[in-house]
Image: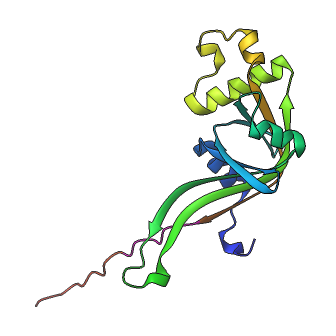
Amino acid sequence: MRRQERQIDLARIKDVVESNHILRLGMLSEDYPYVVPVNYGYEWLDDQLVIYIHGARQGKKISSIKANPKVCIEMDHDSEMISGGSITPDYSTAFSSVIGFGLAEIVTDLEVKKHALDLLMRHETGKGLSNYDLIPDQKVNATAIIKISIEKITGKAHQLPKKRQPRRIVVVVF
């Protein structure tokens, strides 16, 4: 990372993962990279992030992963423009972001698929599958679940400048 002063620690990375609801999944597809935004569920196994996404059983995402399981994820949070006033080079953006690299695999085990969907619903709604109508096993099996085991993860942040408090001038009159 070029700007070491912006690197964030694992606790902050975990906060960004928890606070987000969309991640961008990057894959290699034919001659060009392919990036798609997806909802996700996740769990931390010790300090390793495991992400689950769902979707159709066919399509570019599935065929790309079958051809090359190496993927990249990106998520960002709290982005806001930092004004530079009339000085254009002083404009910037405040943000927190996470980038991870890992291996994707297509899940076939029914119980792992249910676990993945439970994590996804917990992350998106705050409630697990037991709070909803039972999903028939045939529907679960008809859904593609992709498990991404993150092997390397980094994060960085650029904060808004602290607002300066106006100076107080005290005048004492005798």
Q: Residue at x 73, y 22 (%)?
A: 143
Q: Quadrant of residue 95?
A: bottom right
| Rendering coords of residue 126 (x, y %) | 57, 28
| Rendering coords of residue 155 (x, y %) | 70, 60
Left or right: 60 as drawn, with respect to 173? right
Q: Which residues are magenta?
A: 158-164
* Residue 74, above or below 20: below
| Rendering coords of residue 136 (x, y %) | 71, 8
* Residue 74, above or below 104: below
Front one among 27 and 117: 27
Q: Residue furthest bottom?
A: 174
| Rendering coords of residue 115 (x, y %) | 76, 23
Left or right: 149 as drawn, with respect to 59? right
In this orientation, does residue 51 appear?
no
Left or right: 127 as drawn, with respect to 141? left
* Residue 94, above or below 117: below
Q: Is residue 74 magenta?
A: no
Q: Quadrant of residue 171?
A: bottom left
Q: Residue furthest left?
A: 174
Q: Main secondary structure of the magenta part?
A: loop
The C terminus - image quarter: bottom left
Q: Is residue 162 magenta?
A: yes
Q: Residue at x 56, y 28 (%)?
A: 125
Q: Residue at x 79, y 34 (%)?
A: 146
Q: Quadrant of residue 45?
A: top right
